[in-house]
Amino acid sequence: MGVIERKEREREEMRQRIMNAARHLFLEQGFEKTSIRGIAEAIEYSPATIYLYYKDKNELLFALHEEAFLKMMAELSKVAAVKDPFERLIEMGNQYIKYALENPELYDLMFIMTAPMETLACRDEIWEDGMKSFCLLQAVVGQCVEAGYFEHDLDIETASLTIWSYMHGLVTIYLKNRMNMFGDDKQVERMSASYTLFIEMIRKGLKE
């Protein structure tokens, strides 16, 4: 390995250390209480080192947020191989649940953690990462309409928001340990049963 390659690898390793520390502190302390100095202390470097990579904690949060969405979009995009649009919608929901359960910290940072929206918006205060994933859902719902699964005059945006709201609520209840109230170890089975029932409800409800 040459000098340039080694330096680039070391830079990437440091960037990842910074991001890992920031993610942990953002989720543990909250965005407002986390400081660049605190992140620097967590990796045992000076704040000046952080500023070589990120101009402030807003930019650092945005980088974490963007990375998490890229990972989720890669998972959701796998459903493109499913030919039937309604089956594609079902599989998208399965992938969403799978992503949340396998990446609870990332999901928390993306959808649950309180943070100023301006730190997550590139321009005009539009939440671009969130909108991209929502548009992917809208596209599949629209394909279900075209295939005759849902009414032709269905409001696709409202239907997509309703589906997303259910999915988010389901995984959040699980991730925040609210299903522990049942006193057993069947939380995942409950999620699966609830999702199956929801699918049947929208299959019938959006067709009437």
Image (cartoon, rainbow, N blue to C red):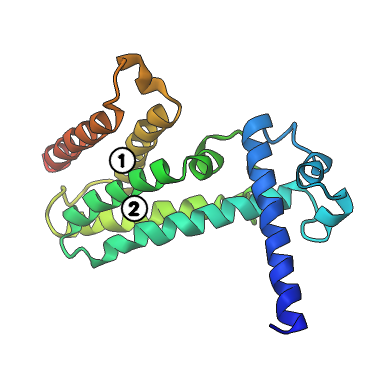
- Secondary element at tag 1: helix
Q: Position of residue 114 (x, y in %)?
A: 61, 33
Q: How many angstroms separate mark 1 from mark 2 (CA)?
A: 9 Å
Residue 54 location, quadrant: bottom right
Q: Residue at x 35, y 15 (%)?
A: 181
Q: Is residue 94 left or right of residue 42?
A: left
Residue 101 location, quadrant: top left
Residue type at the position of mark 1: Ile
Q: Residue at x 69, y 45 (%)?
A: 21
Q: Is residue 111 left or right of residue 47?
A: left
Q: Is residue 43 left or right of residue 201?
A: right
Q: Position of residue 179 (x, y in %)?
A: 35, 22
- Disc 1 to disc 2: CB gap under 8 Å: yes
Q: Residue at x 34, y 32 (%)?
A: 170
Tell me the quadrant of the picture where the N terminus can be found.
Answer: bottom right
Q: Position of residue 46 (x, y in %)?
A: 87, 49
Instruction: In the rendered structure, find residue 137 and report the number of the disc placed on it.
Output: 2
Q: Position of residue 136 (x, y in %)?
A: 37, 57
Label 2 packing within 10 angstroms: few (<14), some (14-19), many (20+): many
Identity of the residue furthest to the bottom in this view: 2
The residue that disc 1 covers is 163
Residue 116 visible to the viewer: no
Q: Is residue 186 above or below residue 192?
A: above
